[in-house]
Image (spheres, rainbow, N blue to C red):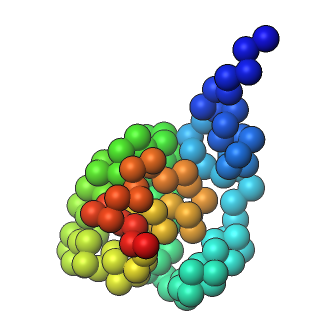
């Protein structure tokens, strides 16, 4: 028998994700609040607007392969509020990486690139 795990098996086994769209099946607002608190973020209505956008984006498009794709969608959606500058004020460690974490989404693999929303 082949011991190589499929991407889906890895997500289910390692990340606890049980659907093919990159969304945690047991995610809730309470989990988001807890994760935000862990990151020292107090979620406001504006944060929830971004979180809801991220979740709707994943529902419509499935998991994102490249951070640039999601970063561009976020910047376009929130351009009137200031784009990336606005988003980084909400999610200081990155709107892609930190936003996805709080929203219960699998971030793109390259989201740990600082230009896409991750700061070490």
Of residues 48 and 100, the one drawn nearer to the viewer in this rendering: 100
Residue at 49% x, 53% y is 107
Judging depth in this view, the residue of 41 and 53 nearest the camera is 41
- Taking the view exactly as shown, the residue that stands out farthest to the right is 1
Q: Quadrant of residue 116?
A: bottom left
Q: Is residue 68 left or right of residue 32?
A: left
Given residues 86 and 67, the one toward you in this image is 67
- Residue 54 in percent (x, y) is at 45, 59
* Relative height, residue 33 to residue 28 (above, below): below
Residue drawn at x 44%, y 49% as measured from the top left: 108
Q: Is residue 19 visible?
A: no
Q: Quadrant of the C terminus?
A: bottom left
- What residue lies at 64% left-to-right and 32% top-to-bottom? 8
Residue 96 placement, left or right of 75: right
How many numbered marks does the figure carry? 0
From the top left corner, tell me how far across and down residue 39 is, in percent: 57, 81
Residue 3 drawn above or below residue 120: above
Task: Name which quarter of the figure residue 64 lies in.
Answer: top left
Residue 96 visible from this viewpoint: yes
Locate residue 56 relative to residue 79 in the image: left or right: right
Residue 93 drawn at (x, y percent): 42, 75
Q: Quadrant of residue 117?
A: bottom left
Residue 68, image x and y in percent? 29, 51
Name which residue lies at 31% across and 48% down: 69
């Amino acid at each position: 028998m082949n011991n190589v795990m499929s991407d889906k098996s890895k997500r289910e086994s390692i990340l606890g994700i049980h659907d093919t769209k990159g969304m945690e099946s047991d995610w809730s607002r309470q989990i988001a609040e807890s994760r935000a608190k862990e990151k020292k973020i107090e979620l406001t209505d504006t944060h929830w607007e971004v979180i809801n956008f991220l979740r709707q984006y994943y529902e419509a498009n499935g998991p994102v392969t490249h951070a640039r794709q999601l970063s561009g969608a976020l910047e376009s959606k929130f351009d009137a509020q200031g784009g990336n500058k606005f988003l980084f004020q909400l999610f200081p460690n990155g709107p892609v990486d930190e936003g996805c974490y709080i929203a219960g989404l699998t971030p793109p693999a390259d989201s740990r690139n600082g230009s896409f929303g991750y700061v070490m």
